[in-house]
Every structure is written in C-alpha cells, then in structure tokens.
Amino acid sequence: MTISLITGITGQDGSYLAEALLERGHIVHGVVRRTSSLDRSRLAHLYANLDIYDKQLFLHYADLNDTTAIRRILAKVVPAQLFHLAGQSHVGVSFEIPEVTCDLNGMATLRILEMLREMPHPPRFLHASSSEIFGDASERPQTETTPLNPTTPYGCSKAFATQLVRTYRRHHNLFACNSISYNHESPKRGENFVTRKICRAAASIKLGLQKRLCLGNLDARRDWSDARDIVRGYMAVIDHHTADDFILSSGQMHSIRELATIAFCSMGLKWEDYVDVDEKFFRPSDPAELCGNCEKARHVLGWKSTRSFSELIEEMTCAEYDWLRMGQR
Ligand code: GDP
C-alpha cells in the first residue's frame, strides 16, 4: 500500500487530493498547522468516517517552519510520495505579508528538500508551483521552458521554490517535480479568491441576503481550471516514471467580466445591476496575460482538463445558493 504525505491537506487541493488518494487505496498522512485557526470543514466528511479517520487517514500537527517537527513526521511516516501543497496561497495578500509569504512558500520548500536529501530513501516529491512564476511573461502561452519573471511577492516565492526543486533534482538526484498550475477553482475555494467571491455574491443577492458586490479589475484575465482536474494532474506528475515539471492549465483565458456574467446569469440576474468597482481590490501589479500551454502534460501524462469554465462557475454558484439557503455557510 502506498503511503502518501500531504502538506496543506486542509486546503482546497489538499482535501480533494486526500479523497482521491484514499479512493486509490493509499494510506494518507496530512500535515496540519498547530496554531492554525483554519476552517477544517473541507475534511469534515473524512474525519466523520470511522472506517477512514485514524485508519487510512492520519493527521500530524506541525508548522512549515518547524524543521524538527517536519523531520520527525517524515521519519515516522516514511512516505513514498510527498505532495507539498502548503503555503500562503493568496497573491493579493502576499503584497501585505511578503516576508511570511516568502518564508512559507520559499524557505519552507528549501527546508523540506534539505530533509529529503538526508533520507536514505527519500519519497517522490511534488511541489505545487504556480503560473505566477512567469509574471510579466516573455511569451504566451507559457511552457515549462518560459523564463521566470515574477511580478508579485507570491510569484517570487514560488519562483524561488520552483528553481530549488529543479536544482535538487539535477544536483542531488531527488525525484522532485513541479506542477506549474494555473488558477484552479471549485466550490471549496477560499472566499477571498475572486471566483468564490463572485459566485457567492450572485447566490446571496438572489436570496436577498446581499445587495451589492465590490470588485477590483474587471478586465483582469485568468486561465482557470477545475481544481479536481488539477489534483488528478498532481497524481499523474508524481506517478510518472521520470521526475519532471509540467504545466497544468486549461489553455483558455476568461475575464472577471465574463466570470460575473456566467455566475449572475445562472441565478437569472444581470451582473451590471449589482457590481461596483473599488480601487481597494486592485493589485499593485497584476500579471496580464498568463495562459498555460499544457501540451507536455497532455502528451506525456495523458492529462487534460475535463470541465469547461462555464460549467465550473455554474456549479460553484449553485453550490453557494444551496449552502446559503440551508444556512450552512
Ligand atoms: P490569483 O490569480 O491567484 O490572484 O486569484 P484571485 O482569484 O485572487 O484573483 C484573480 C484575478 O481577479 C486577479 O487578477 C485580481 O486582480 C482580479 N480581481 C478583480 N476583483 C477582485 C476581487 O474583488 N478580489 C480578488 N481576489 N481578485 C479580484
């Protein structure tokens, strides 16, 4: 039975990944922040399952900057696969807390790579990198060889970690991979990401619980995928016979305006009637044209995204509507 360890198991991707690995029969261990006040509701259904929790799924408390604790977990669990998803994942927030962002995303990855170097049988390692490493990209769409040119503290921290993974793969012979994921969403997305914010507002306005929605740059465009597709990609990357880097993306860009149109439309509303633009939600810098070419993942791993953008946004909006109506969130 394969033993997998996930950092960031309480996040959107971590919780979907835990479910997918459990379904495959893996023993799944997750690292959870001890001081965290994180909402663990994404894993609640797994905790509640007596056949799974503490039998096939185990949680360990450690902060990412607590080297001793992480080292102890690695020695105890002896994973065959390590999915490193944890970090400060919000680009906008990274302008407010750049130091923490760089420590959690950059230095923590370095510390883990150093620990792996010392292990007699290091696990296969996947780092969840991000399209933000390309920043002000020199080409569009980007490929695995596009030069890194990040423009946000988050992007800088991820670029640092991505380059380290490449370095440790080459020079220390670790099975270390980067999945370079573009934006990926689901009903489990955090509320401060724009997809969830808009879908929730559309549902809330429909139910008469909210009157207006304030947004930032409506012309910003992103390459959005379904998080469940991206998580399938993580597993394909780590299972591949050779450690390598792979872009995981939809290859299609949509604007915030289009997003709002789909979300409000699915509630029978027109977004123009409810949306205000507020400078406070604009970023000091916003990579304009990040669009991923996932041809390598498609060709080598047989991976592709399965859901359209509109299906995803409609699902997210309807999920918000149901939760709000039942008073669950
Ligand atoms: P990111 O790509 O990881 O930063 O994901 P987000 O969902 O936070 O933001 C996606 C894009 O939406 C960025 O270009 C933001 O500038 C833009 N955006 C426009 N209005 C908002 C808003 O109200 N909140 C957030 N989070 N992003 C917004």
Image (cartoon, rainbow, N blue to C red):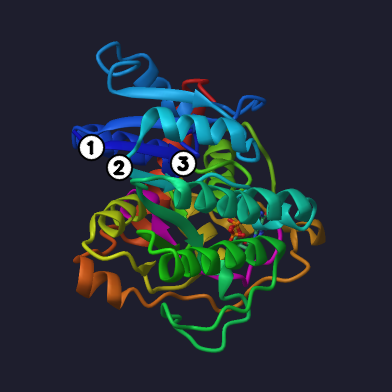
Q: How many marks?
A: 3
Left or right placement of residue 328 versus residue 54 in this view: right
The numbered dot on residue 2 is 1
Estimate how packed mark 1 is, as few (under 14), some (14 to 19) or many (20 or more) residues with alpha carbons within 10 Å. few
Which amino acid type is shown beneath numbered disc 1?
A: Thr
Which amino acid type is shown beneath numbered disc 2?
A: Ala
Whether residue 214 is visible: no
- Secondary element type, mark 1: loop
- Secondary element type, mark 2: loop
Q: Which residues are magenta?
A: 214-229
Magenta-colored stretch includes residue 219 = yes
Q: Earlier in the sequence, mark 3 or mark 2?
A: 3
Where 25 sits versus 151, above or below?
above
Q: Quadrant of ligand 1?
A: bottom right
Give the spatial CA distance, label 3 vs label 2: 22 Å
Q: Which residue is label 2 attached to?
A: 80
Whether residue 8 is visible: yes
State if disc 1 and disc 2 touch (CB < 8 Å).
yes
Tell me the quarter of the image containing the C terminus: top right
Q: Residue drawn at (78%, 58%), measured in percent from left and top? A: 278
State if disc 2 and disc 3 touch (CB < 8 Å).
no
In percent of width and height, residue 172 lies at 44, 63
Where 211 sits versus 221, above or below?
above
- Secondary element type, mark 3: helix
Magenta-colored stretch includes residue 85 = no
Q: Which residue is label 3 attached to?
A: 12
